[in-house]
Amino acid sequence: EERTSGLYKDLHVYQLEHPTQVIEWTSGRTVCVAGFSPSKNEILELRLPRKLFADENKGLCAERDFKVVHGGFTDRPVRCLRHVPGTRCAVTGDGLSSNLQVWDLGGDDSDVIRRTGSIEGRRRRTGVSEGGSSIAARPSSPPQILHGAQISDVQLTELSSGQTLYQLESDSADPLSSLHFLSDAVFLAGCSNGNIYVADTRTSAAPQLSPPPPPPVSSGESVLWWTDASAGPDPSGCRVVRLSSSGQALVSDLRNLGGAVSRAQLDVQTRRCGPDDVRVSWAPALDDCIAVSGRLVPKATTDKMRTASKSSHSPLAGFSGAVQIYDASVWTSELQEARPLFEHRGHAVSPEQSDDGVPPILVTSHVWHPERPRTLLSAASDGSVHVWDWVDQSAADKR
Amino acid sequence: MPEIKVTPLGAGQDVGRSCILVSIGGKNIMLDCGMHMGYNDDRRFPDFSYITQNGRLTDFLDCVIISHFHLDHCGALPYMSEMVGYDGPIYMTHPTKAICPILLEDFRKITVDKKGETNFFTSQMIKDCMKKVIPLNLHQTVQVDDELEIKAYYAGHVLGAAMVHIKVGSESVVYTGDYNMTPDRHLGAAWIDKCRPDILISESTYATTIRDSKRCRERDFLKKVHETIERGGKVLIPVFALGRAQELCILLETFWERMNLKAPIYFSTGLTEKANHYYKLFITWTNQKIRKTFVQRNMFEFKHIKAFDRSYADNPGPMVVFATPGMLHAGQSLQIFKKWAGNEKNMVIMPGYCVQGTIGHKILNGQRKLEMEGRATLDVKLQVEYMSFSAHADAKGIMQLIRMAEPRNMVLVHGEAVKMEFLKGKIEQEFSIDCYMPANGETITVTTNPSVPVDISLNLLKREMALGGPLPDPKKPRTMHGTLIMKENSLKLVSSEQALKELGLNEHQLRFTCRVQLQDPHSDPDTLHRIYTHLKSVLKGYTIQHLPDGTVMVESIVIKVSSSAEDTNTKVLLLSWSYQDEDLGSFLSTLLKKGLPSGLC
């Protein structure tokens, strides 16, 4: 505990009744979380504590708790939740089908989150790829949703009318891991096999495809990839980060997705991972910083574990419970090992406590605050949700 | 239908004061009698006009129960009992009874001396009020009168805080007061058995809050103290003798030990004596850890925490001091504050709410210039930190409590019903119970379904079972006949024969007879036969017999025919039936009065 006092400017730890796999900002001070159990789940809109935002008079503010401002029920798991900017609307996906649910998050006069409708996805090829849809909300109004489970399914639907405004012209069955709007009309689709497609909703031209770099020779498992694209005023200045299940990170320019501006071997790799198990994200307000969380294991340890015959405790537990922050500005075009700038280990079960039978805590999601440079929220499989504002030790050391 | 009524007293949407009226089984109970700390006028008192427009409350209330010593739960008690007027019993736990008057007196001093108020209760009123108090022990059933009984359960939260179980006959209510579902360093967690009350009353604010962990709060506290000490500053922590002070001391002692810190920590002696005194008295109210520690040593024999002498306040260098009173309104903590306020390296940490009018309240509102006695101004340059350590339940906690107690209905007070639809739905869905949210001043009525236990005689039971039919299903009600005897306090169901025997009564049979005149030009036997035929065609499905002794029987009803002495065509029918066949008998007499139809052979 005394170590953490130097590591964090703010640290808040909460326990939800049920774990969440989604954290989505609905305003500068509110987030939505939701359960993912197979049947009954709650969707909650939580208001962050005043103390976090009371920058000048922080000392006089004692309020440290989450307030549940709105809540609703769903009878499906919520694997994906997107807020439609400028509205009180959210769209959810259950990770099983390509159909989405549309919700009204409620106003001042009621605390109920109500389902207002659904969006039908299309599936050109069924049965082959499972997994639900990825969702992205178009930044402008009227509210439109880009969604799909694989490249051939991607479509843009207008929320109010349900009308399909655009469909991505491609036969590819590449399963999606994420969708990102780079501008009002241009979007990027990241696939779990590492392919990246860039398309424009104004044209029906085929999307531009960029494959990932070839996989390392040693890997026996197929490589999975996760992607994030940095937002910015100018889409051409946008950068894309790709993270592989072997821990390789690539930063590319939108203008040249085939090449890599920089790369690094992160101190992680994944074990028996699914497409939903890892999150990688650019910091919206902190240059060149990337956060990584999910079913990750430190690379060094896995190598050690292969050689070690017996181990009295499981160090595995520590790492799928962590969120790591990397500074990509120090990466070069040569593949080198990178150490995280910061590691939030609060969710992890400590090695002394974990037994072999207990599954390790998995960080299910993380998000950066849209404006506060070092504030993040992270959620884990034990129902914990943390809000933390970390101290950049390297900057402190340079003083 | 039997019902229980719940009314939170107060106006509008205001929270911050607890005073709830419950009507159960003909008894009226007041739960808590809190003061609203945000108002300066009569709005701070609960609105007793709901109970009676004028006059004393004694005749209208069977008892008053106070859950714990916080002013928003007991602050209006002396006003209620001595100024409005109530002479009945006031129940509270032993620690609450010991600590309440101290807080009330402090509060009175601030309000009257500092703020110059006149219409407020006096010291004598506090004393007179406390004379009416009957103390409660945990888990001990107390008979308020022949019908009303109450029982206190451990609530955590603060020393002596209780949840209260109220029972009249087979109806019951549990009021939680303020409670906490996770143990802390000096108190255990709330606990209640599966008492299945008709209503569980709790605060709605809990249900919509998800609390930051205790660890984070403690981390923040330690960080602030450490930073101040590191820069050579002094930390003042104004506390009340009991409660958070112990938590924070234990926390600092452990931290100092681990970090090998050398700066002195002081605890003013008055505090130590009082605290030890109360802890000795109420050791059973603390948690297991404290009890173990206390057995081994004095509560305040810490390695790093020493007794304070007021000259130490002038010593140079870093230090931490715990001093009373908690709101900086007088005494030692205020003296120290005056000395240290001018230095920005120093810090004051307020661990709880401060009443209006106190220095604590002013600095927590950001005031940096204070007017002191004799027109002197004090520049507040030290760092002011407001930290809330009070232990409350939250959304998860309230669900846990409902699971523990298994109430049939839920009542949440102090919330805006319109904004609590989700919460209501959640409780209703998860537990299949109704959730009510009365506004202040609004009464909700909950219909109860009390079960009345009755002994059944073995003979009657055997007889019912011998009747055959499908095997009895415990979930399906089955109608049976018996006589209910209420003797003393017991209820017994016996067969009618047994009841008659026990009561020394004879069984009587009631038979009705009636004469109906009929014009019929036939012989008596023929008329009888015609009646028989007529009835057979009308009363299908009934047992109708034409007996050789010259009667017709319909079920148990006997019909005889004889001729009138004056005229042989005028027949007199004699109908006779037992009470059991009253309906059929009446029907027959009406039918036969209409005469026989002509088409009969």
Image (spheres, grey):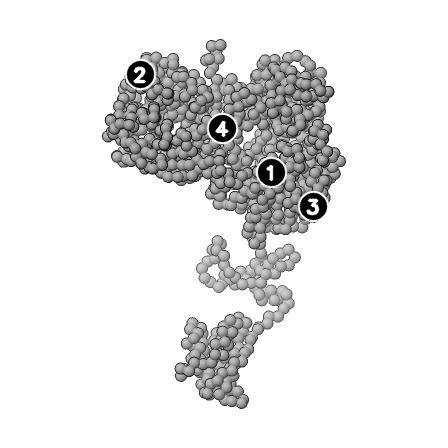
Q: Report crowding for label 1: few under 14, some 14 to 19, many 20 or more residues within 10 A (C-alpha).
A: many
Q: Chain of mark 3?
A: B
Q: CA distance from mark 2 to mark 3?
A: 84 Å
Q: Residues within 10 Å of mark 2 (few under 14, many from 20)?
A: many
Residue B485 lies in quadrant: bottom right
Q: Which mark is residue B177?
A: 1
The kind of residue on which mark 1 rests is Gly
Foreground: disc 1 or disc 4: 4
Q: Is residue B177 above or below residue B563?
A: above
* In the foreground, B291 or A137: A137
Find residue B371 and report its image quarter.
top right
Mark-to-mark CA distance, 1 and 4: 26 Å
| Contact, mark 4 vs mark 3 (Cβ under 8 Å) | no
Q: Where does label 4 land, which residue? A: A48
**Closer to the observer: label 2 or label 3?**
3
Q: Residue at x 50, y 86 (%)?
A: B570
Mark 2 and mark 3 in contact? Answer it, CB < 8 Å: no
- Secondary structure state at the residue bearing disc 1: loop
Label 2 belongs to which residue?
A260
Disc 1 to disc 2, how far (Cα)? 62 Å
Indicate which disc, 2 or 4, sits on the residue closer to the N terminus: 4
Q: Is residue B575 above or below residue B406?
A: below
Could you tell me if the residues under marks 2 and 4 are in contact, i.e. CB atoms within 8 Å? no
Tell me the distance, in whole angstroms, between the alpha carbons under discs 2 and 4.
38 Å
Instruction: Report the amino acid beneath label 4.
Output: Leu
Tag 3 residue: B54
> Residue A237, how many percent across, how many down?
34, 18
